């Protein structure tokens, strides 16, 4: 049973550049959420996708955008990178049919470093 | 406020019990969760408790919930070195779709 997979595992970018992170949900899951985890902190909710639409968004600027594909996989895009965007980006999947409190299953994350 | 609070650090001896505490913010949170994060890895769901329960036991893990005080705890019996990790509690405020995490408690298990 494949869990949540993310790519790439590590990425180094320069300020002002753009980045795309990818996520494949756990088999059978249809909902994908993205979180940002800065060093030494808990994860912060960026947004959630269901049925290819953004369903809920956290307190992140419009530089952060996403997409969900018909196969439920998802991408997170960040434009005009800032040093403060350096973090571990976590993707989590869940099954919407179980309602809003369906447990999230996380991938191992993408470590983004902005120099 | 919106902060889920946890103590930052806990050190225990192997074989002892560990108790990790959390104070959450939203009394309407239907479920409360405990996640484990090992170095360089994502978050692993350990257990969760429905808000109408006071206690849930799952092998070495016991979760206690005090809704009146909005206090959640995770007890790990017979703590092993493999339990060394950061533990996060999380709530779903307002019955919505996002998890709000605490700052995490780093558990160190010493021989």
Image: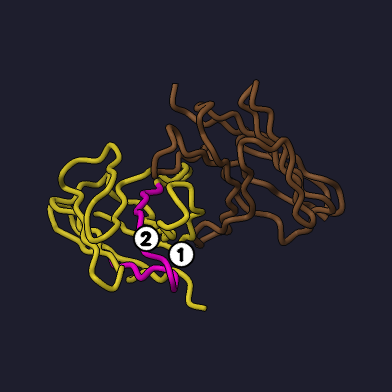
**What is the spatial separation of the Cα atoms under label 1 and label 2, in whole angstroms?**
9 Å
Foreground of the two, A15 or A5: A5
- From the viewer's perspective, tell me whether residue A103 is left or right of residue A78: right
On whether residue A18 falls in the magenta region, the answer is no
Q: Nearer the viewer, mark 1 or mark 2?
A: 1
Q: Quadrant of the C terminus of chain B?
A: bottom right
Magenta portion: prevailing SS class? strand
**Res. A108 mark:** 1
How far across and down, in percent of the image, does residue A89 sit?
36, 56
On whether residue A35 falls in the magenta region, the answer is yes
Check disc 2 and report the residue beneath it. Answer: A111
- Image quadrant assignment for residue A78: bottom left
Foreground of the two, A28 or A32: A28
How far across and down, in percent of the image, does residue A47 sit?
30, 48
Please say if A52 is above or below B74: below
| Residue positioned 57% across, 41% down in the render | B32
Foreground of the two, B1 or B10: B1
Disc 2 packing (10 Å; few <14; some 14–19; many ≥20):
many
How far across and down, in percent of the image, does residue A76 sit?
25, 59
What secondary structure is marked by label 2?
strand
Segment colored magenta: A22-37
The color chain B is rendered in:
brown
- From the viewer's perspective, tell me whether residue A13 is left or right of residue B53: left
Please say if B73 is above or below A30: above
Q: What chain letter is assigned to the residue under label 1?
A: A
How far across and down, in percent of the image, does residue A83 sit?
25, 47
| Residue positioned 35% across, 67% down in the render | A10
| Residue positioned 22% across, 64% down in the render | A20
The color chain A is rendered in:
yellow
- Image quadrant assignment for residue B71: top right
Q: What chain letter is assigned to the residue under label 2?
A: A
């Amino acid at each position: 049973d494949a869990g949540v997979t993310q790519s790439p595992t590590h990425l180094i970018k320069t300020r002002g550049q753009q980045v795309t992170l990818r996520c494949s949900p756990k088999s059978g899951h249809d909902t994908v959420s993205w979180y940002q985890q800065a060093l030494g902190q808990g994860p912060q909710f960026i947004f959630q996708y269901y049925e290819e639409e953004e369903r809920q968004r956290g307190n992140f600027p419009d530089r952060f955008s996403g997409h969900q594909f018909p196969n439920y996989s998802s991408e997170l895009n960040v434009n005009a990178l800032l040093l403060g965007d350096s973090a571990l980006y976590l993707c989590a999947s869940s099954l919407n049919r179980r309602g809003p409190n369906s447990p999230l299953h996380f991938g191992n994350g993408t470590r983004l470093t902005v120099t | 406020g919106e902060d889920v609070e946890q103590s930052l650090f806990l050190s225990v001896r192997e074989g002892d019990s560990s108790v990790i505490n959390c104070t959450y913010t939203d009394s309407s949170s239907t479920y409360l969760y405990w996640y484990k994060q090992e170095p360089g890895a994502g978050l692993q769901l350990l257990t969760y408790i429905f808000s109408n329960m006071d206690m849930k036991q799952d092998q070495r893990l016991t979760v206690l919930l005090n809704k009146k005080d909005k206090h959640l705890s995770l007890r790990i019996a017979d703590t092993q070195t493999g339990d060394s990790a950061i533990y996060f509690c999380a709530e779903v405020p307002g019955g919505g779709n996002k998890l709000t995490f605490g700052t995490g408690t780093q558990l160190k298990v010493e021989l």
